[in-house]
Amino acid sequence: MTSAEIRQSFFDFFKEKQHTIVPSASLLPQSPGLLFTNAGMNPFVPYFLGVEKAPFDPPRAADTQKCIRAGGKHNDLEDVGYDTYHHTMFEMLGNWSFGDYFKKEAIEWSWELVVERWGLPADRLYATVYAPDKAKGDPGEFDQEAWDLWAELFRSKGLDPRVHIVDGNVKDNFWMMGETGPCGPCSELHVDLTPNGDSHGQFVNGDSDECIEIWNLVFIQYNAEADGSFRDLPAKHIDTGMGFERACSIIQNTKGFTDFSVKPSNYATDVFTPIFRKLEELSGKKYANVYPAPGADRSAFDDEMKTAIAFRVIADHLRTLSFSIADGILPGNNGRNYVLRRILRRAVRYGRQLGFSGEKTFFGALAGALVEQMGDVFPELKAREAAVRVTLEREEASFNETLDRGLKRFEDGLSEVKDHTLSGEVAFELYDTFGFPVDLTELLCAERSLGVNMQRFEELMEQQRDRARAAQKSTVVRALDISTNAVTEFIGFDADEVDALVLEVHPQDDSLFVITDQTTFYAEMGGQAGDTGILVIGALAHDVSAVQQIGSARAHAIPADAVVKAGDTVKLRVDHRRRRPIEANHTATHLLHWALHEVVSSDATQQGSAVDEDRLRFDFNSGPLTPGQIEEMEELVNEKINADEPVSWKEVPHAEVKERSDVMQFFGDKYGEKVRVVQIGGEPGTLTGYAMELCGGTHVRNTRAVGIFKIKSEGAIASGVRRIEAVTGERTWQFLRELLVSIEEEAVTMRDKLAAANAKLNSLGEEPVDVGDLPRIIYEALVQQRDVRKINEVIKRSRSKLEELKEAVINAEKRFKKLQASSAAKQADAALALLIEKGESIVTAVESDGSLLQELLNGLKKNQFAEAAFLVVDDGEKLHLGCYAGEAALGRGLKAGDLLRELAAIAGGKGGGKPDMARGAAPDRDKLEELEAAARLKLGVS
Ligand code: SER
């Protein structure tokens, strides 16, 4: 069977067992606390927790799910390429029961598919069951039920269950998605791959490629809580995961289970071979299917082995990067984006092994082969092929630059080497800053007969991991205590208020959760903030502080002391002062999304959005926008607002709009059978608008209600991901007012600075700098305009005037400094002439700054002035004092330092220096005459 046939046969089998086949969800996880979707069960977490009902009848599903295990709890990165069966990205085939069938069917069907349908010899199969160590406080009990079920199956083939069923500890047989979330005991199927199939189970869970796990059946029944406890879930579920590449490997490498003489490898399947062929073509090297012995010395590999490993690492990493980018997760500096960047860099570094020098990129060129092979099963790859290629090329090119800089840092680091060992700090810096995997650093060192202080490196790594772990634990999945089958109808698209019947009341920590038959309250979803408001019982109104969706029911949180019971009729009223601006911001978000596609590119995919009563936030994939593009979008959106366009919505079967490229929807999002299309423009409800989007949120009825739209900021939040923050209506005016006030304030400050600089110029007899009137924008006049184009004009004019003003200040100050310097130089020349040519010894009351004094002293020295001199420069605030003793004066026993000290004291100052030259300063400027007289006396001049 080809890999495509194997995948299909899995689907067919479970379709026969009444499972709905669903597409893979995005690699971007919905559960908080996960870096990537790391298991097939992630997208179904709400069904397991009971906060949503599975929309399948019967509640069963099967799929193939893209998973990444690199960074976070499940992490296989370091093994990739060195063995036959670990990957950073893989497909997980799974079948699911949401509160429907449990252990018996899950176990029997797995046997039926693998043994009966695919024909895997039962004597090569081993099953593990959960055996907790109660002394260590492991959760749950020994899984006798699973043991009995497996035993019956093995016995039916004449096999001894005591050999073929192996106990597993909490690490291997209790499955958890992360620190928190749905979990439970599991049973795994392992396949003996030894040539004769006679390992008797000795390699099970032994981390060996001679016996590998292919299918994990998890019996989900608890939620791991943040406090470490395990809470029973409202229902029991089945979550199974079969490693698709492993299944392909075992089937294809054994010629359909008939020949086990060659050790199977996931890489020796048609999942990987097309990528290897392309890589061979690009590099001119040949791939050999060779693997190192476990634990072998990695630095002693020969060229063939190193090349084989590089091929595998590159192919594996290509898949991870391409699938992620297609799902909109790009390499970057933080969290999951950083994990991707590191993986890409590893791949690029391994590329050097294949002779790619870094002058040209190779990684992006491989994407085509992958898309060709996988594009049918994962259409998002095809749709975003160009984006994938461009991103890979850009990242690779930029790392090639870092790689060379890192090599330079490494060379510099060699000078710090002690005891033939490179410090852990340098190795960590190379890893952390330059993206050098530590084995590259080790290799570079080995070539110079040096070691690396790995202990220190590991310490630093551990510190970094601690920081990452701490950051990850900050978000938790919490199971609700409430389980309900109630159904609440949402009628808040058109109304703010409704009389509703109370169906259930659930006391929670410090509030009551009231579930009603209908509601106008929106629960936070799809980025739109939930409503607040009041719930009125009789004459009493209670604040509704939050709304929570539980399955198909909606609960309103009111204070715990309210008196309300099932059967009561209550009035629910949404706070419309909050709801209206939220709606305006939501409609504006759709308009912005549309304008982005018009102005920038239809490839600028939405990454996330959030709207509340104060603002809207929109994240998307793109390079930086130009100021022109931002303005153009702003104008387009406002044009549509002013055009009085109707906003309407309609529920339609998803199938009807699935293929329509004019209806914006997101790959990887799980849509129900019915979807709501929000349409702007066109005939209401006919899907003929210009901006149409699948959306469950609430909106204004006419674009005019948005008022006015203004972008506050645009910037990067990760490499290739931009964020726009914008405001509408009243908030726009508030923003504009603040903006104008800040421009004016800055202008006033600048005007004062200019006046000061002009005054100084004036003191030198210079013309002042004039830039005309200050920018003055009358806010009220701006409000009158109500036209964003004109408003932008005014803001631009004000800003450019402000810039002009700033420049004038800088110029005036520069001019003054220059003039001052040249006047000081002139004064110094004149003073020197007095001293040297006229034989004066005392020069005082020169008005200048302190620098003149030094110039004078230097001038005297340069001219070998033989006599003594006393100098005073008055800068208007204090007196700068200088004393000089030339050769003749020194010969007479005069000491400049002593003299200066004595004289400075007269004007309340201090100073000192050497016998030939001394400086000081004194604050009492009115003592100038006294000072001069004393100096004359001391120097014996009249
Ligand atoms: N959640 C289990 C796993 O990932 C089975 O799907 O192994």
Image: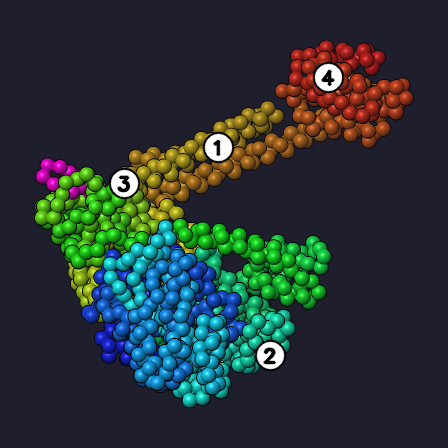
**Residue 17 image-quadrant placement:** bottom left
Taking the image as shown, residue 255 lies to the left or right of residue 871, namely left
Residue 812 placement: quadrant? top right
In the image: residue 303, left or right of residue 633: right
Q: Residue furthest bottom?
A: 258
Q: Residues within 10 Å of mark 1 (few under 14, many from 20)?
A: many
- Distance in Å between CA atoms under marks 3 and 4: 66 Å
Q: Which mark is residue 791?
A: none
Residue type, label 3: Glu
Amino acid tagged 1: Met
Residue 801 visible in the shown view: yes
User: Is the stretch drawn in magenta largely helix, strand or loop?
Assistant: strand
Relative to 905, does residue 507 appear above or below in the rendering?
below
Q: CA distance from mark 1 to mark 4?
A: 39 Å
Q: Earlier in the sequence, mark 1 or mark 2?
A: 2
**Disc 2 on helix, strand or loop?**
helix
CB within 8 Å, label 3 to label 4 = no
Which residue is denoted by mark 1 in the rendering?
750
Q: Earlier in the sequence, mark 1 or mark 4?
A: 1
Q: Earlier in the sequence, mark 3 or mark 4?
A: 3
Q: Secondary structure at mark 3?
A: helix
- Compared across the picture, whether 675 is left or right of 5 comes to left
Q: Which residue is mark 4?
A: 904
* Magenta highlight range: 533-542
Is the CB of mark 1 within 8 Å of ligand 1?
no
The N terminus appears in which quarter of the rendering?
A: bottom left
